[in-house]
Amino acid sequence: MTQVNFDEMPLAERFAKRVILKVAKIVKVEQHPGGEFLYILSLECGDPEPRQIVSSIVPFYKAEELLNQNIVLVYNLKPANFRGVRSNGMLLAASDANESEKHETCEVLFAPQFEPGTILEPEGFEEPAEELCYVKPDKFFEMPMFTKDGFVEIDGKKIGKDGVFLQAHKYVNGTVG
């Protein structure tokens, strides 16, 4: 059996083989009891049980702006604890390409054009045939995504499903994470 070296693959291919992006509907929004900038989001993403993530988007969104919205979840991101609350994934958001590392801008990438449970891939790639293992955050961020003319891309390939693509509306030429 040949050993696969992910680092030698083109970026979009590496992403498609390592990362699962899944559309999820926000069904509950709670303020994190130990973090003024953190929400605890309960998500329905086609699994038998709801999934929970913690996100630092309180400064940018009111709870009612998030409730019942479809978002894009980094589904197989290695779980982490945020001030004692387990987060099973991360939502995707765009930001101003010119901002510093201070997390001063944020546009949650809402995905009303997709049903919860839909897996999104770079164009030209199919969703994985088998369950992928967890991807560590540092490995995920080594595969940068951007918005270009409003579309979310990796390595010049738009992210979507069946010719329908994920879009940003505020930071149309920015970074995604």
Image (spheres, helix red, strand yellow):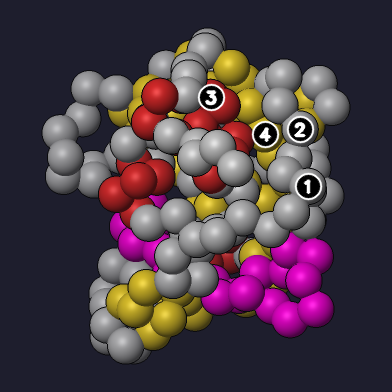
Please tell me how crowded label 1 is: few (under 14), some (14-19), or many (20+) other residues with Cα within 10 Å.
few
- Quadrant in which residue 121 is drawn: top right
Q: Which residue is drawn at 55% across and 75% down?
A: 52
Q: Position of residue 89 (x, y in %)?
A: 50, 63
Is 9 on the left or on the right of 65, as rendered? left
**Label 3, label 1: how many angstroms apart (C-alpha)?**
17 Å
Residue hosting label 1: 129
User: Is residue 112 something one can see in this rendering?
Assistant: no
Mark closer to the observer (2, 4): 2
Could you say whether the residue bearing mark 2 is in a helix, strand or loop?
A: loop
Q: Are marks 1 and 2 in contact (CB under 8 Å)?
A: yes
Q: Do the residues labelled 2 and 4 touch (CB within 8 Å)?
A: yes
- Checking the image for residue 18, the label placed there is none
Q: Give the range drawn in magenta.
A: 41-60
- Checking the image for residue 126, the label placed there is 2
Q: Which of marks 3 and 1 is nearer the N terminus?
A: 3
- Checking the image for residue 121, the label placed there is 4
Identified by mark 4, the residue type is Glu
Please state which of residues 119 and 68 is positioned toward the viewer in this rendering.
Answer: 119
**Label 4, label 1: how many angstroms apart (C-alpha)?**
13 Å
**Quarter of the N terminus within the rendering:** top right
Is 108 on the left or on the right of 160, as rendered? left
In the image, is residue 156 above or below residue 38? Answer: above
Is 35 on the left or on the right of 55, as rendered? left
- Checking the image for residue 12, the label placed there is 3
Q: Where is residue 170 in the image (x, y as percent from the top left)?
A: 47, 28
Q: Which of marks 3 and 2 is nearer the N terminus?
A: 3
**Label 3, label 4: how many angstroms apart (C-alpha)?**
9 Å
Could you say whether the residue bearing mark 3 is in a helix, strand or loop?
A: helix
Q: Earlier in the sequence, mark 2 or mark 4?
A: 4
